[in-house]
Image (cartoon, rainbow, N blue to C red):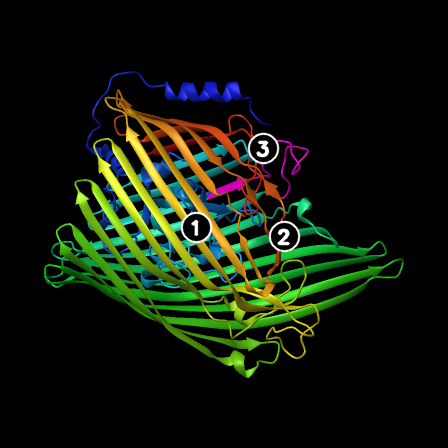
């Protein structure tokens, strides 16, 4: 049941007012949190994202943002994706799987975004994109790069890169942390427990978390007449272990073992208004998506005048996924057809990276590295078709196929940061990659073109920064990106989507992109600005082409009429402006802030001979707010009143599984919501934290785009965190 607005507002005011007045400087234990709070609102934040070397956001040649632990603790979210929602150029994808939120960047699909955990890639060979299987309570910080970045981060980095850095041990011998949240919008809960500490040179952390969300509550609309959005429940569980040891005479060597197990069970919502003749019902489910990962990391610093740093990592990861969809069609009143497809997949990955940081003279800081990644996909697919004509007994046809395919990538990269002058830096890099893919086993006959295929190529980047004045930096960047076809697209025929067969194509080429952007950053006194203007050209996007008489598609001779095959055909041109700004009001604890993105994207659909404006995402999105943060009598109190808003969007591409048709589909009006978050950290050491987050205070009914679920109505999240 939804709580009325006055009650929620009263709870927020009581929480914010629960500490007495009187300012006091925090003690030494608070220093890390205080520093994190300062960094969260300044361009001086240090990050390795974008250059793989430690540099401030102010002096970084790429578009990069950092979300630190202070920021994550002030957002009681159910996923990593929600923590990134308000970054310019970032949007969330959850319409297919509510419990498996993914990220789009600058209009590119989530499949074209690289997701790293502690610098190691999470892979997913589905066409839906890579989810983020990490619990927010175990996150130290998140670094986000927007734009093409394959020189340093390999395949998939066309839209951008997300690097999630997990937490290490507490700085005391033993600390026990616990936390949780209650969600009125889904009648859900989340809880976590984490013992951690440091004993001499050894640090450790064990984190266990779990959540459960029921169907989300939404305002009455065309999506729900009952106020509940059916089939939107999900359940997550996560166990993470960190063991680290610092060694060496100067303590400049660090070795860490990280292990993680994550499991997910999610329903899938489908919009009945999207059904097209002859479809009468459609459903998706993912009762299992489990990930097991073990990784090692070694870092050494201050090694000598030339070899400054060394990084080596290796990991082993397995993703087990059970996916199913069902579709019912009624071509005529007397004919009913039901198709149920399942895919039971095991995706095994292992690989690693070695990177050397070299100081070559006073002006050149060079990094050089090698990377290896092995992907092995073992998939069992079945399709059951049940047909009934009038009063006759139904006929049932079952098809089954098993494939095991592999993709091995070897690459080498190098980058030079050249300090041309005290205020000017030029950063150039290149990456060579060599990919071997093969269909190793199959229940079907393996053709010669499926046995082994090799792709090799280069990508490059060149960026510059110019500190034109104190606190003012101009930057320019050219960068390239690529993404290899998934193993499913290369080797595994499937009937996903709405039952139409799509043939794999082992001759697919990588999708590629070229990105140009200009930017400016200003940080002086109480004002901060970060502006980016970009233009991206992408080509060889993978789509599907119909087989049949007269078709130019590279289909097999025995291809079933009406089936499809994956091909490289489409192109896209994206341009946009991204802005982040904040101003600290003089002699007060208030800060006015805002973020906004304007984007325009054109699609060239070669097979349809159409060049169309892509309005599937809002042209303009943003957040504007007033933030309060101060310390009263040993208590840290904060509040954030903000507005989220977006212009309209329209579904212009109707996808039937992998098959895209251009037409004007659903229209989603522009919207705006008023939201309030507030909280308090109790005690001199701020070891008890309470928060209340009120979303969509005016109970607006809206849906941002076809990629997102209809939004929750007025709701609250109540959170707590304790440390002993």
The front one of 363 and 588 is 363
Q: Is residue 490 visible?
A: yes
Q: In the displayed image of the protein, which residue is found farthest to the right? A: 391
Q: Which residue is mark 2?
A: 663
Q: Is residue 493 above or below residue 109?
A: below
Q: Decide if residue 454 is on the left or right side of residue 584.
A: right
Q: Which residue is mark 1?
A: 105
Q: Is residue 682 visible?
A: no
The front one of 440 and 522 is 522
Q: Quadrant of residue 511 in the image?
A: bottom left
Magenta highlight range:
210-231
Q: Decide if residue 133 is on the left or right side of residue 699.
A: left
Q: Is residue 334 above or below residue 78?
A: below
Q: Decide if residue 224 is on the left or right side of residue 23.
A: right
Q: Which residue is mark 3?
A: 701
Cα–Cα span, label 3 and label 1 = 25 Å
* Picture coordinates of residue 127, whole percent (x, y): 53, 60
- For label 3, the SS is loop
Cα–Cα span, label 1 and label 2 = 23 Å
Q: In the displayed image of the protein, which residue is found farthest to the top? A: 21
Q: Residue at x 24, y 31 (%)?
A: 526
Of pointers 2 and 3, the one earlier in the residue sequence: 2
Q: Residue at x 65, y 38 (%)?
A: 223
In the image, residue 215 lies in the stretch drawn in magenta: yes
Q: Is residue 340 above or below residue 622?
A: below
In the image, residue 651 lies in the stretch drawn in magenta: no
Of pointers 1 and 2, the one earlier in the residue sequence: 1
* Picture coordinates of residue 477, whole percent (x, y): 30, 55
* Picture coordinates of residue 270, whole percent (x, y): 64, 47
Q: Quadrant of residue 649 in the image?
A: top right
Cα–Cα span, label 2 and label 3 = 25 Å
């Amino acid at each position: 049941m939804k709580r009325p607005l006055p009650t929620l507002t009263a709870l927020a005011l009581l929480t914010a007012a629960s500490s007495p007045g009187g300012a006091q400087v925090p003690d030494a234990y608070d220093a890390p949190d205080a520093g994190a709070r300062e960094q969260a609102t300044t361009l001086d934040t240090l990050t390795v994202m974008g250059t793989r070397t430690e540099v401030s956001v102010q002096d970084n040649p790429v578009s990069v943002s950092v979300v630190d632990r202070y920021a994550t603790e002030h957002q009681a979210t159910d996923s990593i994706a929600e923590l990134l929602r308000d970054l310019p150029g970032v949007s969330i994808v959850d319409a297919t799987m509510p419990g498996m939120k993914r990220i789009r960047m600058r209009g590119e699909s989530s499949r074209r975004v690289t997701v790293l955990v502690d610098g190691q890639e999470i892979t997913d060979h589905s066409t839906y994109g890579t989810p983020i299987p990490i619990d927010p309570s175990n996150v130290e910080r998140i670094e986000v790069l927007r734009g093409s970045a394959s020189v340093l981060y390999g395949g998939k980095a066309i839209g951008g890169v997300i690097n999630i850095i997990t937490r290490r041990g507490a700085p005391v011998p033993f600390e026990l942390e616990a936390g949780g949240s209650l969600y009125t919008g889904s009648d859900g809960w989340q809880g976590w427990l984490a013992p951690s500490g440091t004993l001499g040179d050894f640090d450790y952390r064990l984190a266990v978390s779990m959540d459960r969300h029921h169907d989300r509550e939404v305002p009455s609309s065309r999506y729900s007449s009952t106020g509940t959005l059916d089939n939107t429940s999900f359940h997550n569980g996560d166990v993470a272990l960190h063991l680290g040891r610092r060694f060496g005479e100067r303590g400049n060597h660090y070795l860490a073992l990280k292990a993680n197990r994550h499991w997910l069970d999610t329903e899938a919502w489908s919009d009945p208004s999207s059904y097209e003749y002859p479809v009468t019902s459609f459903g998706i489910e993912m009762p299992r998506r489990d990930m097991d990962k073990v990784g090692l990391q070694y870092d050494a610093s201050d090694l000598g005048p030339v070899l400054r740093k060394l990084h080596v990592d290796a990991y082993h990861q397995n993703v087990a996924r059970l996916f199913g969809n069902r579709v019912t069609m009624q071509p005529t009143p007397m004919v009913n057809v039901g198709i149920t497809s399942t895919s039971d997949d095991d995706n095994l990955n292992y690989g690693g990276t070695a990177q050397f940081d070299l100081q070559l003279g006073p002006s050149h800081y060079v990094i050089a590295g090698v990377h290896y990644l092995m992907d092995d996909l073992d998939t069992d697919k079945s399709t059951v078709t049940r047909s009934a004509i009038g009063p006759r007994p139904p006929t049932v046809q079952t098809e089954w196929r098993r494939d095991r395919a592999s993709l091995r990538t070897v690459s080498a990269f190098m980058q030079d940061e050249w300090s041309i002058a005290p205020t000017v830096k030029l950063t150039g890099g290149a990456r060579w990659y060599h990919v071997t893919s093969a269909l190793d086993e199959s229940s079907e006959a393996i053709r010669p073109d499926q046995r082994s295929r090799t792709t090799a190529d280069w990508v490059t980047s060149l960026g510059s920064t110019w500190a034109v004045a104190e606190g003012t930096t101009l930057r320019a960047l050219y960068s390239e990106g690529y993404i290899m076809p998934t193993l499913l697209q290369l080797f595994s025929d499937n009937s996903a989507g709405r039952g139409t067969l799509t043939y794999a194509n082992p001759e697919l080429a990588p999708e590629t992109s070229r990105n140009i952007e200009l930017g400016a950053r200003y940080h002086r006194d109480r004002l901060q600005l970060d502006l980016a203007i970009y233009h991206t050209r992408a080509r060889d996007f993978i789509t599907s082409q119909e087989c049949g008489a007269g078709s130019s598609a590279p289909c097999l001779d025995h291809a079933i009429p009406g089936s499809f095959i994956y091909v490289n055909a489409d192109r896209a041109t994206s341009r946009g402006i991204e802005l982040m700004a904040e101003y600290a009001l003089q002699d007060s604890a208030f800060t006015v802030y805002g973020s906004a993105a304007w984007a325009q994207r054109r699609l060239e659909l070669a097979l349809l001979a159409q060049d169309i404006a892509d309005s599937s995402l809002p042209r303009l999105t943003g957040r504007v707010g007033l933030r309060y943060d101060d310390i009263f009598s040993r208590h840290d109190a904060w509040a954030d009143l903000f507005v989220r808003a977006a212009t309209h969007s329209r579904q212009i591409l109707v996808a039937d599984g992998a098959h895209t048709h251009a037409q004007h589909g659903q229209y989603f009006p522009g919207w705006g919501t008023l939201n309030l978050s507030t909280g308090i950290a109790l005690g001199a050491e701020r070891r008890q934290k309470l928060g209340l987050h009120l979303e969509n205070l005016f109970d607006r009914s809206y849906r941002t785009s076809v990629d997102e679920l209809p939004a929750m109505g007025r709701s609250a999240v109540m959170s707590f965190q304790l440390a002993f």
